[in-house]
Image (cartoon, rainbow, N blue to C red):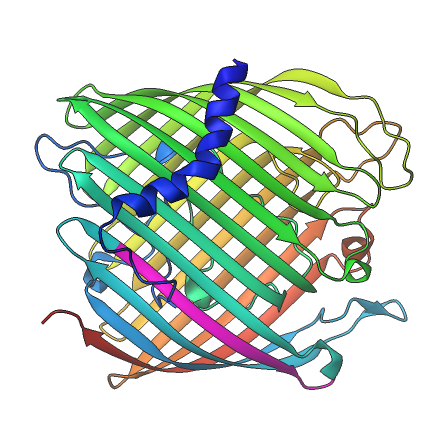
């Protein structure tokens, strides 16, 4: 078992180098995909297997099929004005509201070749506040998502997303912020300090090989990092990181039905003011995927997950608390549907995950959903929502940061002429973490925004 741990951790470190060494002409550096960084794999032929969502490491597509376009270079400029009722936390017992103005140029590349599909984006930005000028910020958003076919039956995939901002709501594409994944290993960014300096990075790299007509094996490595440069802005929250690796076997029982098993290893770290809290997990998960059609799929997974919690350093002192170990059930499911004018995705998981800023690893129940409707040729609407319950492992003596997050967004987008888009939206965030100081005093955030963007697109290779 220790050997498997070393193999999985090694994948996290070595897989990126392996990916790029196999590409004769490496893809360009990260460059907003206005439709979000999600990527759909190539359609399977009669003998070609798909990588099931529980082990693919990819997000479900948000766009409808009528919006799908590839081989385009896009760019432009977006101006966003937003009102939030919780800009700087409580003052004299009441949250302080403010109006912000953001300017964000962007460039995006969506390219498909017979062997490579790549979606990349880069969107810097500047945000100014009407009253609280000390909150003015410079944003950085970048992502890359690719699939590269080494041979007819061997596919490499990778994704990476980076964000630097003091406002978690500042996204390159506000309508695409609620991406849903059916994976068993996902970053936990559910604990949100709405206005605080924050650096986050999440990535995945994997390889899948079909070695027989109906059998596939694969391996992947994932990592996440969360860093708060100014700890005084987020009392009760801490830096965290995750490294994980997995291997899987999948069997295509019929054209529509896939069965499989995966072994997963995680190393979950958080960094309180004294010491380092570490948890290691191992899991054997069985999964099933139904491909009812090329646009409709359902997946489920479940199995035992073992957690080894090391000595824990509580926030209130440097004396470590003893470690512990336990067996826990892990389970989840997902559904993705994509039609010409509509798309819908939802997922649920019950797993041990990184704390995402809390004091240690957590037992997490998470549910997410996203719906998008193309109302007319130029008008679309989207709804996203999420819920996460985080229960910390291994912290005793009455010290608990357990709590939950509930969020939801609604947006409407209208296209004027060929290059101008207007987007209106509302976001509601509620967090119940009574012992996290930065969240306990003002648990609710409401945000209304309007965004106007100028966009251009140029076909590639035509």
Up-down: is 343 above or below 15?
A: below
| Residue beneath the point at 39% across and 36% down | 334
Query: What secondary structure is the stretch in magenta mostly built from?
Result: strand
Q: Quadrant of residue 45?
A: top left
Q: Position of residue 162 (x, y in %)?
A: 51, 58
| Residue beneath the point at 39% across and 38% down | 15
Let me know if residue 132 appears in the view.
no
User: In the shown orientation, is residue 337 left or right of residue 132?
Assistant: left
Magenta segment boundaries in residue numbering: 118-131
Question: For this rendering, which residue is in front, 233 or 445?
Answer: 233
Up-down: is 298 above or below 285?
A: below
128 in the magenta segment: yes
| Residue beneath the point at 51% across and 30% down | 9
Let me know if residue 26 appears in the view.
yes
355 in the magenta segment: no
Q: Position of residue 230 (x, y in %)?
A: 76, 62
Quadrant location of the C terminus?
bottom left
Q: Quadrant of residue 209?
A: top left
Q: Quadrant of residue 156?
A: top left
């Amino acid at each position: 078992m220790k050997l498997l741990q070393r193999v999985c951790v090694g994948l996290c470190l070595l897989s990126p180098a392996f990916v790029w060494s196999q590409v004769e002409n490496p893809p360009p550096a990260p460059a907003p995909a206005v439709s979000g960084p999600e990527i759909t794999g190539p359609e399977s032929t009669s003998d070609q297997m798909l990588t099931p969502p529980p082990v693919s490491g990819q997000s479900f597509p948000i766009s409808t099929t009528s919006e799908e376009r590839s081989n385009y270079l896009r760019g432009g400029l977006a101006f966003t004005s937003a009102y939030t009722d919780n800009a700087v936390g409580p003052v004299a017992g009441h949250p302080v509201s403010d109006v912000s103005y953001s300017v964000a140029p962007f460039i995006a590349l969506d390219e498909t070749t017979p062997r490579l599909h790549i979606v990349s984006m880069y969107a810097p930005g500047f945000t100014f506040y009407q009253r609280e000028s000390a909150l003015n910020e410079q944003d950085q958003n970048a992502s890359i998502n690719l699939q590269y076919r080494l041979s007819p039956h061997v596919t490499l995939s990778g994704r990476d997303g980076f964000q630097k901002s003091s406002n978690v709501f500042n996204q390159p594409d506000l309508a695409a912020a609620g991406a849903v994944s059916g994976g068993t290993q996902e970053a936990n960014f559910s604990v949100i300090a709405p206005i605080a300096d924050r650096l986050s990075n999440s990535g995945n790299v994997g390889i899948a090989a079909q070695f027989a007509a109906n059998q596939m094996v694969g391996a992947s490595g994932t990592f996440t990092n969360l860093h708060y440069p100014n700890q005084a802005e987020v009392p009760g929250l801490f830096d965290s990181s995750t490294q994980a690796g997995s291997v899987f076997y999948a069997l295509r029982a019929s054209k529509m039905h896939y069965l499989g098993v995966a072994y997963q290893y995680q190393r979950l770290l958080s960094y309180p003011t004294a010491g380092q809290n570490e948890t290691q997990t191992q899991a054997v998960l069985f999964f099933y995927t139904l491909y009812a059609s090329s646009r409709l799929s359902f997946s489920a997974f479940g199995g035992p997950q073992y957690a080894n919690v090391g000595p824990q350093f509580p926030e209130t002192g440097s004396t470590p608390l003893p470690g512990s170990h336990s067996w826990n059930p892990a389970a989840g499911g997902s559904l993705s549907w994509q039609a010409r004018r509509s798309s819908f995705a939802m997922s649920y998981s019950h797993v041990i995950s990184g704390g995402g800023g809390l004091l240690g690893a957590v037992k997490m129940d998470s549910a997410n959903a996203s719906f998008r409707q193309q109302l007319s040729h130029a008008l679309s609407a989207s709804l996203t929502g999420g819920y996460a319950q985080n229960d910390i492992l291994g912290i005793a003596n009455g010290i608990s940061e357990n709590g939950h997050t509930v969020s939801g967004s609604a947006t409407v987008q209208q296209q004027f002429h060929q290059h101008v888009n207007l987007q209106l939206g509302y976001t509601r965030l509620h967090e119940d973490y009574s012992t996290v100081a930065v969240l306990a005093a003002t648990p609710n955030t409401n945000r209304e925004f309007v965004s106007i963007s100028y966009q251009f697109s140029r076909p590639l290779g035509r």
